Amino acid sequence: MTAHTHRGGWIIFFTFVAAMILLMVPLPEWARLLRPEWVVMVLIYWCMALPERVGVGLGWFAGLMVDVAQGTLLGQHAMAMALVAFLTIKLHQRIRVFPLGQQALTVLLLVMIYSIVMLWIRGLTGTAPTIWSNLAPTLTTALVWPWLFMFMRFVRRRYQVK
């Protein structure tokens, strides 16, 4: 058996940091409703590209960082992102061969699962938002996915992340 060396861990870290920054950029009220789920998209990408390196644990940690950054109930984003990471890893071989349009639909479904979990947790705590405030980011995430995928694939290949 050959030893597989991992390279580019700092690139993976940097993409999550960039996604967190995009999550925290102040926007007007109307644009906040349309903000894509950047951290979830980056998590989905890395779980598809390198499922042996990025998984449920990193998804949970990224979600925990989102909880801290947004001041939400500790663990709600962590649980939802861990679920998305698990599903992505289970389906990664199928998703990777899809054309970008079908990948965007798959990402739409994964982010919708994420949104439903978030809506469920918020409902349990008595702070359920409107359906539109959960649906809009899901749609914009699916629309942004093809461009993010192509950019992330370029970065992964350019820096030879393995």
Image (spheres, rainbow, N blue to C red):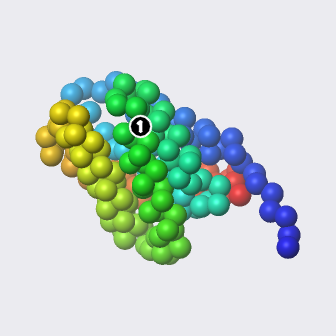
Q: Is residue 25 above or below residue 60?
A: above
Side (left or right) of 140 relative to 153: left
- Residue at image position (52%, 36%) is 18
Give percent across and percent down for residue 64.
Answer: 47, 36
**Could you tell me which quadrant the N terminus lies in?**
bottom right
Q: Is residue 148 above or below residue 52?
A: above
Give 147 or 110, whichever is nearer the viewer. Answer: 110
Q: Residues within 10 Å of mark 1 (few under 14, many from 20)?
A: some
Give 128 or 28, whichever is nearer the viewer. Answer: 128
- Residue at image position (40%, 66%) is 103
Residue at the farthest right position: 2
Q: Is residue 46 above or below residue 97?
A: above
Residue at the farthest front position: 124
- Residue at image position (33%, 65%) is 105
**Could you tell me which quadrant the C terminus lies in?**
bottom right
Q: How many marks?
A: 1
Give percent across and percent down for residue 10.
Answer: 69, 41
**In which quadrant of the rendered view does residue 106 lie?**
bottom left
Q: Is residue 155 visible?
A: yes
Side (left or right) of 134 relative to 87: left
Residue, disc 1: 75
Q: Is residue 147 visible?
A: no
Give 138 or 112, whichever is nearer the viewer. Answer: 112
**In which quadrant of the rendered view does residue 6 lie?**
bottom right
Q: Secondary structure at mark 1?
A: loop
Q: Amino acid at mark 1?
A: Gly
- Residue at image position (37%, 70%) is 102
Give percent across and percent down for residue 52.
Answer: 64, 60
Side (left or right) of 24 relative to 117: right
Q: Is residue 141 above or below residue 73?
A: below
